[in-house]
Image (tube, coloured by chain):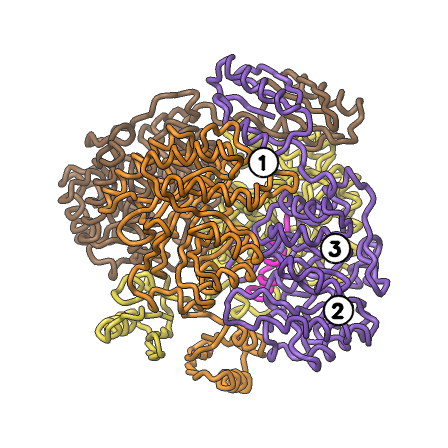
Chain colours: A orange, B brown, C yellow, D purple
Amino acid sequence: MIVMSAKATPAEVRAVVAKVRLLGCTPHVSHGRERTIVGVVGHERDSDLDAVAALDGVERVVRVLNDYPLASRDFHPADRVITLGNGAILGGQGVLMMAGPCAVEGRQQLTESAEAVAARGVKVLRGGAFKPRTSPYSFQGLGEEGLKMLREVADDLGLAVVTEVLSSEDVELVASYADLLQVGARNMQNYRLLQACGAVDRPVLLKRGLAATLDEWMQAAEYILAGGNQQVALCERGIRAFEPSVRFTLDITAIPVLKQLTSLPIVVDPSHAAGRAEYVGAIARAAVAAGADGLLVEVHPRPSEALSDGAQSLDPASFDRLYQQAGRVAEAVDRCLV
Amino acid sequence: MIVMSAKATPAEVRAVVAKVRLLGCTPHVSHGRERTIVGVVGHERDSDLDAVAALDGVERVVRVLNDYPLASRDFHPADRVITLGNGAILGGQGVLMMAGPCAVEGRQQLTESAEAVAARGVKVLRGGAFKPRTSPYSFQGLGEEGLKMLREVADDLGLAVVTEVLSSEDVELVASYADLLQVGARNMQNYRLLQACGAVDRPVLLKRGLAATLDEWMQAAEYILAGGNQQVALCERGIRAFEPSVRFTLDITAIPVLKQLTSLPIVVDPSHAAGRAEYVGAIARAAVAAGADGLLVEVHPRPSEALSDGAQSLDPASFDRLYQQAGRVAEAVDRCLV
Amino acid sequence: MIVMSAKATPAEVRAVVAKVRLLGCTPHVSHGRERTIVGVVGHERDSDLDAVAALDGVERVVRVLNDYPLASRDFHPADRVITLGNGAILGGQGVLMMAGPCAVEGRQQLTESAEAVAARGVKVLRGGAFKPRTSPYSFQGLGEEGLKMLREVADDLGLAVVTEVLSSEDVELVASYADLLQVGARNMQNYRLLQACGAVDRPVLLKRGLAATLDEWMQAAEYILAGGNQQVALCERGIRAFEPSVRFTLDITAIPVLKQLTSLPIVVDPSHAAGRAEYVGAIARAAVAAGADGLLVEVHPRPSEALSDGAQSLDPASFDRLYQQAGRVAEAVDRCLV
Amino acid sequence: MIVMSAKATPAEVRAVVAKVRLLGCTPHVSHGRERTIVGVVGHERDSDLDAVAALDGVERVVRVLNDYPLASRDFHPADRVITLGNGAILGGQGVLMMAGPCAVEGRQQLTESAEAVAARGVKVLRGGAFKPRTSPYSFQGLGEEGLKMLREVADDLGLAVVTEVLSSEDVELVASYADLLQVGARNMQNYRLLQACGAVDRPVLLKRGLAATLDEWMQAAEYILAGGNQQVALCERGIRAFEPSVRFTLDITAIPVLKQLTSLPIVVDPSHAAGRAEYVGAIARAAVAAGADGLLVEVHPRPSEALSDGAQSLDPASFDRLYQQAGRVAEAVDRCLV
């Protein structure tokens, strides 16, 4: 919908109408008391509308429909379901718990973490082999060696693996070890990486960028879907807001809003949102109550020795409590933690 | 703690030390490899530290302790409890449901709303007689006439009343009708109003400002407490963030953080946060799961005829569902909806 | 403009059309490929549209026109000009410098500050007698005694006075001493105060709320204008964003945007935005370059002894530099500092 | 600096002290009235402090020093200067104008744009061959063909070329055509790309992420510097805030703050900040007044035909005005536009 300025001349309105027709769309002109508005119906794209916005006499262009046809619920009304290698299911009736250490630091730490979460009933192991770190001087992960450890430890316990892929060049490599490829918040608009994820035959967990609107997030998912990979899940992990006492602000409202916009499964990462272990349980319970389809939780056998994110990692006893509490909340909303 | 710049001279450090002593505090100087840091112990105030920050050679002043002694949990470790006129209790084991229309529009609308929520078991009626409206041309509320209706309708049904007070001049008037005085988000730093609320013998529900940090919110509560009124509860109602599809972004993480900082009861208003009725249920359930002590929900007999906030008001049937679901979540976290 | 959901039935569309007519507006229905859209022409208000948004089948309501007819440039195309008591002019060709201490602390401090800025050529003295402070334990200002000092010191030097009014009860009092009433950021949506400012015969400087959109700010100005007071100026003083190294983030882009939306004069307060004296000069120059009509700068004879905001106050020598630099930038954009 | 909780036991304090020593740092314990604080001096890293934060009894860890030694002004006090292939200089006394179309669309459009800006005196041509687009359905750029055109058109006119590189795989390719490699806002924390930029012998222009703090931005620059490439410049292009009438909010205050933190040159992109051509001039003038070392401006021969960003592109006549005005402001701050 194109809002003309109050001073737009009839010639300017005619130019806008002509441009809209040139773009293959149908213009609908309505003359209000103060302004003229040109409605546009058709398969226009952002770039086209940008061009219209630059015409003389145009005050504003307001988009009415979304720009992510494949990701939208209109296109795929039923909730989508992703089945991982070990049969674990993301989406649908269950709420899938994924847990493990922030980073793979070594075999012992990984084995201890994996055994702790598997003992609790968890079926998906998380752990980072390639770590995106704010500082170049922080621990950057074990790379392929870490991927191998993840796969071996997970196979021993019958777990699936979710781990981050940082770059388009690594997609094939990570996909050869992992059941679920995680795209991190800082890469949500790394379009090369999204395209590479669209071309691989592995489910993808797309985290929300720190300042991404829901619309931008859906369009990032659309990159993967448009590439041919229909197995995409979303992960809310906190947005950047102004409160200094937490690392990020979890956008709980995003869950019901996304449930309307899309049928892709929605995961919540309560660990990164607050950045401190003592808040993780409350956020995890809230996420399940609001309708999340999965949780991604950091667990470390000894958080005070962790090489990254120690402050927000749960020890096994705290994770036990979280698991039990989140399970009870899941039942209260007629679901169950799996 | 005062961080000196890398180039600070010994004379500049001495001047800072002298100033700190003048303020009646004790300085602790420690010389690091790159910088000198002056720790300050004592009852300094913000204004004092501002003065220090202006001295030559000072790079930064970092505050370590909070500035709200009365509101802090350190001061009052046990959870505080507020008992309203009809015996309804805010804080403690129960989760208190407060519900009713956004604005009092007339006796019939109010009576229908109140009967609908009372039938469900609700003990506290919400409703606005003085309305803060963004536009001067919007409905501004019925004023004292609305307060009278609220009181009469509530008394008929055995309900307590929570309603907003907009101005220090009105505090006495509103307190003569209401059980719980609501201070709105836009007035969170209206210090005259806070002072007047500190001087009255009525509990106060202090909503968080749209862009208030938790620290600023606690200091606003401190105004009321310092005035002598110890009956203060807090209400999270969404902060201003960048997402355009919702009116505000509910800060769910604030609940566990506040539970550490303070023992004041914490209420959540799910209706204002998202601004659309279909999101209210999910947010309400999340709030209870995260530990909220109360909910404040907008209910209208016919939302499409509401004079304000129709889009976010629940009709009685939707409220019934919310009440039942929130009740089940409350039980899942070992509490009960009252 | 009302966007119907993809699944809206013809009956739902008819109900929306009927509601729009009931509100006294004219509906324009257009059926797109995916959705039906109902355009609304007329003098509808926010509250009306809220009601429509609650109807079944409505997905979204998009506002096209602004809700501040009196404040808009459409209503008053020519730049508005405010003349203060001593003949100083805000708006138009000049850029008006207003300077002085954050708070009036005593006669000597005020006199020294006023003489310093008057010596530089400044015609408007700023200074706070009623101080809004985050903490109840901070210095709260001298009250009416401070107002008297401001008036006397200003009169001795031929200066006009701008000072803050905190509460509707004080508007008459402050107006009896001041030439320009400042409404602070934390009171931008204190509607009682705005209404009282609308009823007084004194120019008002309305600061932007910390998280106010331009639209909300314009509607706050509309409260004053609708009350009958046409002498309103706006003051940008930084918004709340996520950057921790500054107190606020000055929204420089707001200046050209506001210049399109409204003809009210626009002032910038560079002192509060950054919160540190060393950034004030750069922000002041930027504001003038972007088109600001005035500056509001904190100057203190000895910032390290200030009772409030010492870190962001300029000493007289620094103010001299700022004045000279801002004056040169003003000339570069064909204006002059007055 | 480690702040212990009010209830920390002596044993917990001893454990923190021991951990700090284990990390190779020196602890300084000071016992305040309410809390004990442990200062840490040494070359600790974030990951280490995370581990400390997870110890019992620790309330908070406050960082005092920055984590970007190479990027900091402490390390390199003098303003850094980057000389491009054609002798154009970024940093130092001049303010470097870089201009051209958002995207290279074809030879004619590029040639017209380049001739228009070269005629004005501009020495650096901007233009995108690899375009990061929010939607997968938008124009994605001409790729290497676009790079070749850029180089040829620039060489004909004696211009240097600045263009975006999207992926680590493309760094060598883009560096073989461009004088200055641009890393876009959405890639600011694409660490693989930063590492690849650190290994190449070409200057890099690092744009600020939409929600990046200055500290995170400096650490991103540190990735490139730590890789061995000392030719890094920064580009502020607007942050994500809550105002809906602009695409982004230019953070003008960042300029003086960065000037203190670092000696790297600072560029401002006024075109992306506001997203509309009519605001670009005001923002560009403000940037120069605040101390920017360069401008990056979108110019298109016919904005209404642009394939991307038409709404924010200047036509040649508007660019002429901007160039002249920015030049006058540069002189007002004792610099000159080059």
- Would residue A111 be found to the left or right of residue B165 on screen? right
How far across and how far down the image is residue C209, in percent?
Answer: 52, 48
Q: The C terminus of chain B is located in which quarter? A: top left
Q: Chain of mark 2?
A: D
Give the alpha-carbon distance from disc 3 to disc 2, as whole Å.
21 Å
Point out the tag, 3 or 2, that comes first from the N-terminus: 2
- Depth check: give the residue in front, B53 or A73: A73
- Depth check: give the residue in front, B160 or A71: A71
Residue highlighted by disc 1? C129
In the current view of this chain or complex, which residue is farthest to the top?
A: D10
- Depth check: give the residue in front, C200 or B39: B39
Give the alpha-carbon distance from disc 3 to disc 1, as whole Å.
59 Å
Q: Are marks 1 and 2 in contact (CB under 8 Å)?
A: no
Q: Amino acid at mark 2?
A: Leu
Magenta-highlighted residues = C250-269
Instruction: Tell me what residue is drawn at x 22 percent, y 37 percent.
Output: B337
For mark 1, does the 10 Å Cα neighbourhood hold few (<14), some (14 to 19), or many (20 or more) residues?
many
Q: Say whether mark 2 and mark 3 are on the same chain.
A: yes
Q: Nearer the viewer, mark 1 or mark 2?
A: 2
For label 1, the SS is loop
Residue highlighted by disc 3? D200
For label 3, the SS is loop
For mark 3, does the 10 Å Cα neighbourhood hold few (<14), some (14 to 19), or many (20 or more) residues?
some
For label 2, the SS is strand
Write down the quadrant of residue C62 in the picture.
bottom left
Q: Chain of mark 1?
A: C
Q: Amino acid at mark 1?
A: Ala
Residue highlighted by disc 2? D125
Q: The N terminus of chain B is located in which quarter? A: top right
Q: Can residue C82 be seen from the camera position used here? A: no
Q: Are marks 3 and 1 in contact (CB under 8 Å)?
A: no
Q: Say whether mark 2 and mark 1 are on the same chain.
A: no
